[in-house]
Image: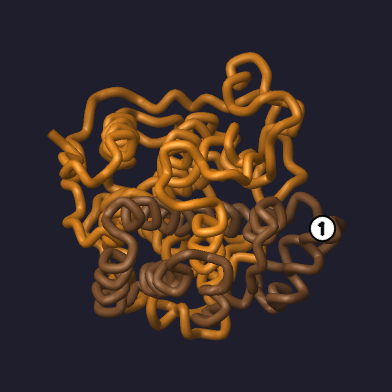
Chain colours: A orange, B brown
Amino acid sequence: MTFDYDRSIRPDIAIAHRAYWQKLAKPGSWFTSAQRIAIAAASREAAGCEFCITRKRALSPYTLAGEHVSSVDLSATVVDAVHRVMTDQTRITQQFIENNGSELSVPAYVELVGVVVAMISIDEFHRGMGLPLETLPDPKPGEPSHYLPPQAEQGTGFVPMIPIDGATGLESDLWSPGRTANVVRALSLVPDAVRDWRELGDTQYLSFESMGNFDQPKGRSINRMQIELVAGRVSSINECFY
Amino acid sequence: MLRVSAQTTKTDINLQGIIGNEEAASIGILYGAELMRFAEALALGDDKALDLARQSLRDVAGETVLVDAAGVAANFQRMVRIADSVGIPVDDMQGELGQSVRQELSLHEFRSSENSQP
């Protein structure tokens, strides 16, 4: 069984990680199963990529030429996007996202971000606990759906998103009316990426419903101040203004 | 969120713990220094420091605290990348509390603050 943690780790964490592994192995909106798993593998390779280390030190991240450490069957454009999200995300620009052409459309970029961030949350939990990384799943057959939520619109951030009052129809489960935030809407051009976001966040951090409650969170051994100290320190080191 | 949770519980804290001040992290927050060091080591990708910080947190607070802290830290390694990879602005730049926190921690020096400019 995957994510076969010992008893010290809350069962809901293993359930959420296992559920994501099953979704990772299915075709997405813009990538096949094999491509999604390759993106996941690329996210792991980014951590030790010499070119990423060099580029991170460079004044401009868009003028340096070089090759990423990569053993996956993905185009150089897709590998580069994965590595940027992993190692140099604060310098990603709208121009970069829009200039990847047919090799990486804007909706496909959003799905890529969704896979990379889900991977980082699971792998970083393992690293935090001192556990080995889980073996990636085997790909499943099928084709991407190419689904685009019709209500998505440009206007917040670099990519189109579902508007605050747009969680309707097939997207009515994404957030309750009026109860959302830009970080929730960020990946909504690929609605399943938001669903993945919520399921992992519910167990690793807090559920949407409990975020507004600043008392002791149910099922957690640390209080809200302890939680926010950890969250704040990680965000600060990553230089996240949001 | 840290300031709001402290206000809600009427606890005196020092936000400088967020930017790595160990003494400040301990004010009003149980295991604050150990939690801060653990989060820091994880986010910096420093495996040697992470081994030490993990053991230190485990020793003083126990395994369940370590598990919950690892979950939160891992979650925020993700959240920062969601925010910056698609360039979302802060939802409410005008809120008084947010403005004072950003000022106190000098967050406007971060490159990604450009995404929240009018």
Q: Residue furthest left?
A: A1
Q: Residues within 10 Å of mark 1 (few under 14, many from 20)?
A: some
Q: Secondary structure at mark 1?
A: loop
Q: What is the chain letter for disc 1? A: B
Q: Residue at x 21, y 62 (%)?
A: A130
Where is residue A14 drawn, in percent x and y? 27, 38
Q: Is residue A145 above or below residue B53?
A: above
Rendered location of residue A199, percent (x, y): 44, 34
Residue at image coords 74%, 33%? A164
Residue at 24% from the left image edge and 25% from the top image edge: A141
Residue A92, given in percent of the width and then of the height, sits at 57, 64
Residue B24 in sight in this render:
yes
Q: Nearer the viewer, residue A63 or A162?
A: A162
Corner quadrant of residue A225:
bottom right
Residue B86 horizontal side relative to residue A202, left or right: right
Vertical arrangement, residue A78 with respect to residue B111, above or below: above
The C terminus of chain A - image quarter? bottom right
Can you name the residue that lies furthest to the top here? A169
Which residue is the site of mark 1? B93
